[in-house]
Amino acid sequence: MKRRSFLRNSALSTAGLFITKDLFSSNQGPVYGHNEMTYRLNTSWGALNPEKTPVNDCHEMVQDSKGRIILLTNETRNNIIIYNKSGSLIDTWGTEFPGAHGLTIQRTGKEDFLFLTDTKRHQVYKTTIDGKILLTIDPPADLPAYKQKDAFVPTETAVLENGEFYIADGYGAQHILHYDANGRLKNSFGGKGVGDEFFDNAHGICIDYRKETPTLIITDRTRNAFKRFSLDGKLIEIIHLPGACVCRPVIKGDYLYAAVLRSPNLDTVNSGFVTILNKENKVVSNLGGSEPVYENGQLNPLHQTDKLFIHPHDVCVDNEGSIYVAQWASGKVYPYKFTKA
């Protein structure tokens, strides 16, 4: 009888452990996203003392080779804020970039470098990870579109493994500019226009290494699309994202992630979300957005469903698969963090 009572009590205790675990899991907060890409949100992850470490627009974020999360803001008391993955402050630098907008990291295997774009100074900079400027790119005056300095309003860069890089002039004349590793212009394509090979808000750019031949993925934000180009500027395909004014594409593993600033157009305020595409360029999940549905191979228009964001501007995906979201014109909020559910 004693043994029987022991077994019964042990079973009840074990069951109680499972019940407690299930209740604990269910109390971790709501789950956002769809299919295999679902997440839980932490809105206080990167919150700092705004009197000591303020932000204005949180434009873009990257992770360096040491695992640190680097944020770019156009707050000139500290343009760069460096966090650990727990959201604690490590360091800050930068007071000279009032139009800080694009942030790209170059990993060489030995040392990391940053590429920053400044829309107010009309320049692009390559810096060390602690802020020493190594290279400055001015408007390419030899091109007819850039006879006036103000025509160059660069929003993003992308760096090849050999050190060559591309600049997306997303707020200016809409050209994609290809430079060698020393900052000499090699090629340009795109520009404003109504054909598929042209852009209307070429806001972001990245190198896609997911297939054997690397390609460029470039944002055409007003037209709700990403466009794939060869490295020498030939249009390959258009990835239509109806209802999504996407910012820059960010590739991690097999997936492409992007902040959607507004939906369905740039006139719709406080309406953004985060979208995730698979290797076949199909939307598989939206964080704070509608479930992706394809009919006859066409994606139904997307829209915001949860008021998680005001104007999400960029995402950073760390080496554990967590997503950090920077927001523009959002009441000076610090970045949010999503962890896999």
Image (cartoon, rainbow, N blue to C red):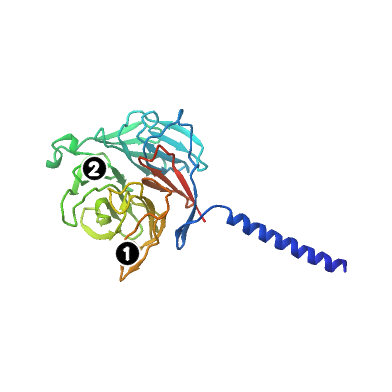
Q: Which of marks 1 and 2 is nearer the N terminus?
A: 2
Look at the numbered discs 1 and 2 and tell me whether their residues touch, using CB distance below 8 Å.
no
Q: Is residue 136 left or right of residue 334?
A: left
Residue designated by label 1: 299
In this rendered view, identify the residue nearer to me: 15 or 271: 271
Q: Where is residue 22 in the image (x, y as percent from the top left)?
A: 62, 59
Q: Which amino acid does label 1 sit on?
A: Leu
Q: Which amino acid does label 2 sit on?
A: Tyr
In this rendered view, identify the residue nearer to me: 91 or 26: 26
Secondary structure of residue under mark 1: strand
Front disc: 1 or 2: 1
Residue designated by label 2: 171
- Determine the residue positioned at 37% across, 43% down: 105
In this rendered view, identify the residue nearer to me: 63 or 148: 148
Q: Position of residue 1 (x, y in %)?
A: 88, 69
Q: Where is residue 2 in the image (x, y as percent from the top left)?
A: 87, 66
Residue 116, compared with residue 241, is above or below; it is above
- Please rate how many residues cluster around mark 2, counting C-alpha atoms within 10 Å: few if below 14, some from 14 to 19, many from 20: some
